Amino acid sequence: MADGLIRLSGMTQAVFVRTAERHGLPAAQARLLCMLAAGPRRMSELAGLLGIEKAALTGLADRAERRGLVARTAVPGDRRAVSVALTPQGREVASAFHRDVSASLDRLTDVLPPGERERFCRSLARVAMA
């Protein structure tokens, strides 16, 4: 089981990186856009979700902001907190990236017959939710 999950993780990461490259995104920016697709997040929260130091996140956000993909704003009532959100252009890029990476990942299971694929998807969802 562990070997299979490790191989699947490697395959998933490879798809993610290749898709990000096709979209002209460094993998770190693609991850940032994915994290922001559900809505704005505080910088401190993003650092934890991405598993990077706040200083590294600041540089990542700077580069994404220069590209017009994200915007940072102050959090009302908390002078030190900053929120990051996708811009309209960032939403378009994130949506196109998500569609492309999802289609590529779906193709990984093309080797399974339909019933087995459905069982795999249900089992994967259960494991991911646990």
Image (cartoon, rainbow, N blue to C red):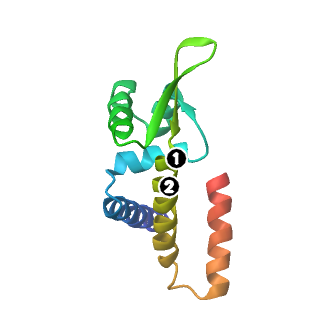
Q: Is residue 62 left or right of residue 12?
A: left
> Mark 1 Cα within 10 Å, few/some/many (few <14, many 20+)?
few
Disc tally is 2
Q: Residue tagged by mark 1? A: 88
Q: Amino acid at mark 1?
A: Pro
Residue for point 66% across, 67% down: 123
State the residue in front, 65 or 80: 65
Which residue lies most toward the bottom here? 113
Distance CA(mark 2)–CA(mark 1): 6 Å
Q: Amino acid at mark 2?
A: Glu
Residue for point 56% across, 47% down: 37
- Give me the disc on residue 130: none
Q: Is residue 20 left or right of residue 47?
A: left
State the residue in front, 119 or 66: 66
Element carrying mark 2:
helix
Percent position of residue 52, x then y: 39, 33
Element carrying mark 1:
helix
Percent position of residue 56, x then y: 33, 30
Q: Residue tagged by mark 2? A: 92
State the residue in front, 108 or 19: 19
Q: Is residue 62 left or right of residue 75?
A: left
Q: Are dots 2 and 1 in contact, CB under 8 Å?
A: yes
Residue for point 55% across, 85% down: 112
